[in-house]
Image (cartoon, rainbow, N blue to C red):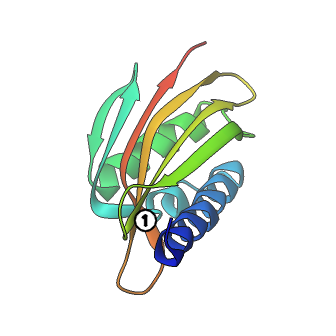
Amino acid sequence: MSHQNNAVVATAKAASEKWKAAFNAGDAAACAACYEETAVVVAKPFGTFTGRSEIEGLWAKVIGDGFSNVEYLEPQITAESETTALLTSRWQMNKAQGVITRELWALQPDGSALLREDHFEAVG
């Protein structure tokens, strides 16, 4: 793995921590800001959400329904390309748990990473 790929993994990891902190602070707008403008979230069983405002609506509802304290269990982050990294993980919250099958983090022109795709499933 090249140094560049290590950098994309480290950047994605930091961005993922930022997203978790925003969620755990109950800040749906800050959660949504971690996604690209045209990002897609596929959230089973909730549906598919496209673009930042729909994604913010999803997280506002989840937070409003009292879900909090998300934790990732054994996350794996690997470089998919020079500019993208893939995160998969099991997760748990206060009232739910599930699996992340595809979080695709993409490097941005400013050097940060934002989510391009977010596929996850909640199971009770």
59 or 73: nearer the eye?
73
Residue under pointer 1: 114
Q: Say whether residue 38 is left or right of residue 63.
A: left
In the image, residue 7 sits, relative to residue 74, either above or below, namely below
Q: Residue furthest top?
A: 124
Taking the spot 60% from the left edge, 68% from the top edge, the residue there is 10
In the image, residue 54 sits, relative to residue 95, either above or below, namely below
Q: Residue furthest bottom?
A: 110
Q: Say whether residue 43 is left or right of residue 3.
A: left
Image-quadrant location for residue 92: top right
User: Where does the image place residue 6, in percent across and percent down from the top left?
Assistant: 56, 69
Mark 1 neighbour class, 10 Å CA radius: few under 14, some 14 to 19, many 20 or more: many
Taking the spot 31% from the left edge, 47% from the top edge, the residue there is 54
In the image, residue 87 sits, relative to residue 53, either above or below, namely above
SS for callout 1: strand
Image-quadrant location for residue 75: top right
Amino acid type of the residue that numbered disc 1 sits on in the rendered structure: Leu
User: Where does the image place residue 30, in percent across and percent down from the top left?
Assistant: 54, 63
Image-quadrant location for residue 62: top right
84 or 36: nearer the eye?
84
User: Where does the image place residue 101, in percent across and percent down from the top left?
Assistant: 45, 32
Taking the spot 75% from the left edge, 28% from the top edge, the residue there is 94
